[in-house]
Image (cartoon, rainbow, N blue to C red):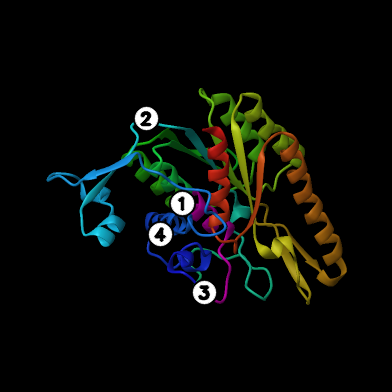
Amino acid sequence: MRSEYNRYLKPEVVSRLANLELKAKFVVEGFIAGLHKSPYHGFSVEFAQHRQYMPGDDIKFLDWKILGRTDRYYIKQYEEETNLKSYLIFDTSKSMSFASLRGHGAKRRGRSNLKTENDSQLSKIEYAKYLAASLAVLMHFQKDATGLVVYDESIKNYVRPKSTNQNLKLLLNTLSNAETSGKTNTASVLNEVADKLKRRGLVIVFSDLFDDQKKVINALKHFRHYGNEVIVFHILDPQEMNMFIDSPVIFKDLETNKELLTQPLQLMEAYKEAVQSFIETYKRECRAAGIDYVLLSTDTPFDKGLIEYLNKRKKLM
């Protein structure tokens, strides 16, 4: 029987919750609850200390677990200083809207379409939102300053990195309202952001990376040139990674609207080889540049992304 905390690391469960902030908090609470369990027993998210509750204290800092165990009221006290400045760079180009049907053909799903747990994967942008929001909440728990860049062909929104409650709400609201539009221009945007960063920090990219590979890789190296640490979350739909369609189908480019009728059985092997080469190139070049590359499909539990962040953060402290 699966532990309760593990449920909220599963994308299909989290997708049914009410709003992005609630989803992120459930993911993080589930993640923290499971940190002491295998295989993550070596990690922890620590508070500076606890103190006894005093009248007038904000009850949102009450440690409910201690209350349940001891029937005593204690408040979590956090370190005052900000430990790390992080930038979440979030791709909203039209290709990020793709979501395939489970066990069926590829499909583009709009905001008005109904979905059930059994019929459709999360779209790439939905999955990326949940992961980015969860990371923002986890960083806030640790008093790290977190900022956000939302882009397609150019930067659409920018939230400055801060560690305040108000900034977290602004960041989560900006993520929640982000919608796919336009073509991608990942390389240009990454270069623009790299030139603007005034202080070295941690840069986390959420994208399907459907852009000129050489230009994107050079742009990622641009961050490293200025001394930033970088994590790339390469987010793909399972069907993009391993296409299987057994009947004629029309492929539609979500960014250009071009269509192509094809016999997929004739091209599946070539497609798989091309995708594997695409992924391996990013993996190899990122490793060579000291960049953490993390491939995630939209059915991957969120703890994989969160543990990669904690791995990186642990090295930086």
**Is 154 left or right of 278, judged from the image as shown?**
left
Cα gap from disc 1 to disc 2, whole angstroms: 21 Å
State which tag comes first along the sequence, 4 or 1: 4
Q: Position of residue 111 (x, y in %)?
A: 49, 63
Q: Is residue 158 visible?
A: no
Cα gap from disc 3 to disc 2, whole angstroms: 42 Å
Question: Mark 3 near mark 2, Cβ–Cβ under 8 Å?
Answer: no
Q: Single out the residue that lies furthest toward the front.
A: 70
Question: Which residue is at the front of the view, 304 or 190?
Answer: 304
Judging by the rendered image, the residue that carries numbered circle 2 is 81
Judging by the rendered image, the residue that carries numbered circle 3 is 117
Give the crowd class for mark 2: few <14, some 14-19, many >=20 residues within 10 Å.
Answer: few
Element type at mark 3? loop
Question: Mark 4 near mark 3, Cβ–Cβ under 8 Å?
Answer: no
Question: Which residue is at the front of the view, 159 or 37?
Answer: 37
Judging by the rendered image, the residue that carries numbered circle 1 is 134
- Three-letter code, disc 4: Phe
Please count the marks in the image. Answer: 4
Judging by the rendered image, the residue that carries numbered circle 4 is 26
Cα gap from disc 1 to disc 3, whole angstroms: 21 Å
Mark 1, mark 2: which one is toward the viewer?
2
State which tag comes first along the sequence, 1 or 2: 2
- Three-letter code, disc 3: Glu
Question: Which region shows up in magenta?
Answer: 116-133
The image shows residue 197, relative to residue 290, as above or below, that is above
**Is 185 left or right of 168, judged from the image as shown?**
right
Element type at mark 4? helix
Give the crowd class for mark 3: few <14, some 14-19, many >=20 residues within 10 Å.
Answer: few
Q: Name the residue located 55 percent from the left edge and 50 percent from the top edge.
A: 307
Q: Name the residue located 27 percent from the left edge and 61 percent from the top edge.
A: 68
Q: Position of residue 215 (x, y in %)?
A: 73, 36
